[in-house]
Image (tube, rainbow, N blue to C red):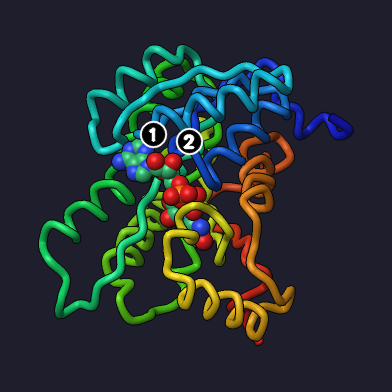
Amino acid sequence: MPLAAYDLTGRSAFVTGAAGGIGRATAVLLAEAGAAVHCADLDEKGLRETLELITAAGGEAHLHPLDVTDRNRVRAAVAAAGDLDVLAAVAGIMHSSTVLETADEDLDRVLAVNFKGVLYACQEVARTLVARGAPGSLITMASGAVDSAGPGLLCYSAAKAAVVQLTKTLATELGPHGIRVNAVAPGWIRTPMTARHDSEQQHRAEATMARVAPLGRVGEPDEVAHTVLHLASDASSFMTGQILRPNGGVAMPW
Ligand code: NAI
């Protein structure tokens, strides 16, 4: 670790969505930076793969198979994890349907996973930090979808907009406790989530990024994980209530 501010040795992080994509890249990177990482996800097989990656690199990982929409399971996992310093609430799902075709159950599921799942993790981890009188860093996963609108994205972007408001509100409430709360809003990242789009959608996204992103390409999970590491570590000690956008420069104001 060349820079001490990024060293997480002796710290403990809880990462949701750690079985794949951005969550796995985050868990692996935080472990590389020295943190003991508590990996939570629905996908037990994916969690075991993440554990293998971390332990093979000499890191420390613990697994918590759970659904982030189950508050009791989240509370129990946070309690079992012991003294935490960092939360990266990454778990999320994509859903696409037009407003006119959106069914109640679709809206409920997307809000449950993408908003309530983040809320529960933030509440449970923050309560333990406040009770211990410990500083900490909470990181939520928003999306570039909060900066724009597009057909089919109401459920997803509304849930992510709620995550942004949660992040800013919590930052004001927890700042006096020395707890920082920031959001990451990635652009199009190559993960299992985006790989589930059909090939035409993927092709269109890559072509769009080539055209509108100053960096001219889609992103990789590791590039988002490095933004999370920055927010998790003392390198960002004066940042709270912010939204960082690893997105290749899309939607920059020009
Ligand atoms: P992914 O689908 O590759 O990984 C998401 C992980 O969350 C999976 O391991 C999945 O099992 C887990 N998960 C889903 N529902 C869960 C639940 N109810 N309880 C526990 N775990 C659950 O997705 P990706 O691309 O890595 O996305 C991670 C986060 O980043 C999501 O919140 C997503 O909305 C956000 N994001 C992704 C972008 C992209 O282009 N990939 C762009 C902007 C935001």
| Quarter where residue 152 is shown | bottom left
Q: Are marks 1 and 2 in contact (CB under 8 Å)?
A: yes
Q: Percent position (x, y) of residue 22?
A: 55, 47
- Out of 165 and 189, give the one closest to the viewer: 189
89 or 22, nearer to the observer: 22
Q: Which residue is mark 2?
A: 19
The image position of residue 203, as x and y in percent, is 55, 77
- Of the 4 image quadrants, the one containing the C terminus is bottom right
Is residue 171 visible in the rendered image? The answer is no
Q: Which mark is residue 196?
A: none
226 versus 107 height, above or below: above
Q: Is residue 249 above or below residue 184?
A: below
Q: Position of residue 155 (x, y in %)?
A: 27, 65
Q: The N terminus is located in which quarter?
A: top right
Residue visible at 55% across and 66% down?
A: 188
Judged left or right of residue 4, residue 152 is left
Q: Which mark is residue 43?
A: 1
Is the residue marked by circle 2 packed among few (<14), some (14-19), or many (20+) residues within 10 Å? many
Q: Is residue 34 visible?
A: yes
Residue at mark 2: C-beta within 8 A of ligand 1: yes
Side of 8 relative to 14 (left or right): right
Query: Alpha-carbon neighbours of circle 1 within 10 Å: few (<14), some, or many (≥20)?
Result: some
Cβ at disc 1 under 8 Å from ligand 1: yes
Quadrant in the rendering for residue 247: bottom right
Mark 1 secondary-structure assignment:
loop
Q: Give the amino acid type for the residue marked by disc 2 in the picture.
A: Ala
Q: At which x and y percent is residue 160?
A: 37, 59
